[in-house]
Each structure stands twice: as structure tokens, then as C-alpha cells.
Image: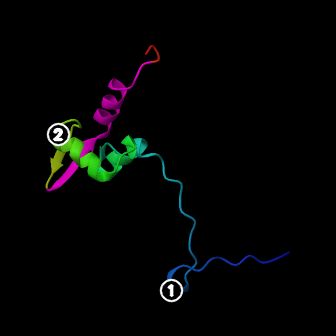
Amino acid sequence: MKKVKAKKGRKGAPSLPRPEVPPVEEQQELLRVNQTGLVLGVSEMTAYRLIKRGLIPWIKLGRHIRVPRRELLRLIAANALSDKV
């Protein structure tokens, strides 16, 4: 039987496999702007522009902008095209 060597990470330590990351929608209640862009399929800059225009609901925590996940998903559902079109 052949021995399998562990891949070496930084400073010679073996690297561990990365855990599966659940979709952004299932991770947290408040999304960062870059995560909002990922959910919408747009760039981070476009997400900022949509927030600035008032098209995406947001809150400010200190100097950080966060988008409520549920509100974003509601917005997507409300603007989705129906099958009857």
C-alpha cells in the first residue's frame, strides 16, 4: 500500500481540507455588501449603487453597511418574473 503525504501548508504545517460553506442565504441574518452582490449576481460596486439609490434595504452598524437577508430575499421574490409572462 502506497503512503500518501499530506500537503504542506505555510511553514511546513499540513494543510487541512476546507469545510463546506453553506450558501450565503443560510449563514447569517445580516449580509455584508459584497455578500449582497453575490446573492444578486452583481459586483460589490453595483450592490453599493443599488443601496445608494434606495433599491436595497440596509442598516448601518457603526461605519458598516449591512443588508437584512430576509428583506433582500423578499425583494428578489417580489421582483421575480412570473411564469405567466
In the image, 77 versus 62, the foreground residue is: 77
Q: Nearer the viewer, residue 11 or 35?
A: 35
Disc 1: which residue: 11
Image mark for residue 70:
none
- Taking the image as shown, residue 47 lies to the left or right of residue 5, namely left
Image height of 14 relative to 80, above or below:
below
- Using residue 67 as the reference point, say whether residue 84 is left or right of it: right
Residue 32 appears in the rendering? no
Residue that badge 2 annotates: 53
Residue drawn at point x = 49 percent, y = 53 percent: 21
Instruction: Return the x and y of residue 38 as percentages of the image width and height.
Output: 39, 47
Q: Which residues are magenta?
A: 63-82
Residue 54 falls in image quadrant: top left
Q: Along the polypeptide, which appears first: circle 1 or circle 2?
A: 1
Q: CA distance from mark 1 to mark 2?
A: 47 Å
The quadrant of the rendering that contains the N terminus is bottom right
